[in-house]
Amino acid sequence: MNLLRDLLAWSLLLTLSAAHGAPKGTAGPLVGNLTPSTATLWIFMPVGVKGEITATPSAAKTLAATGTFAPVENLAGKAQGTPAKVTLTELTPDTLYKYSLKIDGKESGELKGSFRTPPARGNPHKFRMVLTSCMKFGQPQDSWNLVLAQNPDLHLTIGDTHYADTTDPSIQWAHHLRYRRVPQYAALLRSVPTYSMWDDHDYGPNDSDRTAKGKEKSLAGWTQFWANPGAGTKETPGSFYKFSWGEVDFFMVDGRYHRSPDRAPDDKQKRMLGDAQFSWLLDGLKSSNAKFKVIASGSTLNHSKADGWRIYTFARHRFLDAIREHTIPGVVYMSGDIHRSLVWEHHESKRVGYPFVEVISSGVANSKTLSFATVDFDTTAEDPTMRVRVIMGDKKVETDRTWKLSQLSPK
């Protein structure tokens, strides 16, 4: 039955690919991790074909970059195709590149896109990011058009990127590919650098935690289907990683792989991130000289009564108190999960020493509101700012608030 299911899924995926104009058997491309001088892209291709990319900069004095996609192992079996990645090097900071792909020497209008490299590390800069979560096949997808219309420089998607509800990568890959062939979503991935973090429905079953069987395979599959800059450390497995954009550092934290069960006693033994990942996060925050430090994870701080930091009192207080203890300015938290979007200041902000802002963006394609959030960072100002907007699927701007860095600093 499993083989029949997978064959039927593969047949459907090929049909969808052809219907959307992309070469048969492909999905993507996806623009992933960018640095001032490199760009990593992902694509899914039939086995045995060759994928090549040429990226041409807008600056006339800068040379074009070329590369060949290198296949990575597909846990679902190479007979269905293979994911592949390429990293372009020697790029110019803060430069717009337009690219095109060839599959076995043939170009396709669906295999073109663009990206802008971030500025050099530490340079004052203005940029816009968009935050999304909770994306489900078969639901309305028009909000992706609204997301793209915001002209974001980068995209964070922080959980429930599909609803496979299993740790079995042979099922997960079909869900990944099916959703990446949704035309509206595919258009975004082609031209907006996307960084991802899983939550329960794409890590394993609903509300899953460190006890999930097969989580190692789930992690291996996850890294194959995204172009993130990393996953965990040599000592500590997980999907967590860090990246920077100008004067903003992003810490993508894994709230599932090391998480204690939700129903465990709410005592000093209950963990959200696990001790090793928490130490990694705190060390990163302490050493960061970025103006703003964004911590992104699927789990909300307070708005979920059954599956978030709210029922992890020791872990939550240790986290908030550490920011105050080490006088770390400019920390902001971003989350999803709850199928509605909002921005608020945590009621326990006194533990931090300044308003602890949480941006919740959930339900871009699986909610009544079909909402998402944009965040504009401006570190060129004497007092750098962060502007947050919540945008509904009907284009209504539900919230528009701005914080200055001086407001988000210990007093």
Image (cartoon, helix red, strand yellow):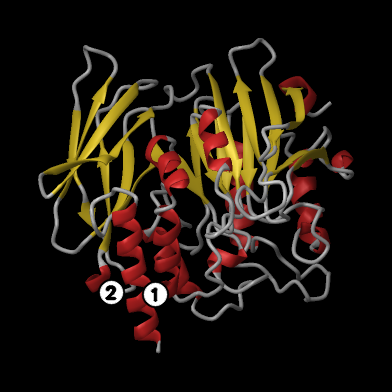
Q: Amino acid at mark 2?
A: Gly
Quarter that holds the N terminus: bottom left
Q: Residues within 10 Å of mark 2 (few under 14, many from 20)?
A: few
Instruction: Residue 234: tell me if it is visible.
Output: no
Of residues 236 and 398, the one drawn nearer to the viewer in this rendering: 398
Q: Residue 105, percent across and down?
A: 10, 45
| Residue of label 2 | 77
> Is mark 1 in CB contact (under 8 Å) with mark 2?
yes
Label 1: element kind: helix
Would you call the spot at circle 1 few (<14 residues within 10 Å), some (14-19), or many (20 or more)? some
Q: Nearer the viewer, residue 323 or 4?
A: 4
Outermost residue toward the left? 105
Could you tell me residue 402's position as x and y percent? 75, 23
Q: Picture quarter containing residue 170? A: bottom left
In the displayed structure, 8 sits above or below 236; it is below
Q: Residue furthest front?
A: 19
Which quadrant is home to the C terminus? top right
The percent position of residue 103, horizontal first and vertical second, equals 17, 48
Q: Position of residue 397 (x, y in %)?
A: 73, 30
Residue 389 higher or lower than 264, as above or below? above
The residue most toward the bottom is 1
Q: CA distance from mark 1 to mark 2?
A: 8 Å
Q: Regarding mark 2 in the picture, which secondary structure is present there?
A: loop
| Residue 92 numbered mark, or none | none
The residue at 63%/33% (across/down) is: 374
Q: Report which residue position mark 1 lands on.
A: 170
104 relative position to 92: left or right:
left
User: What residue is drawn where x is 53% and y is 16%?
Assistant: 124
| Residue type at the position of mark 1 | Ser
Q: Earlier in the sequence, mark 1 or mark 2?
A: 2
Q: Residue at x 32, y 78 (%)?
A: 7
Examine the image and state in which quarter residue 200 appears: bottom right
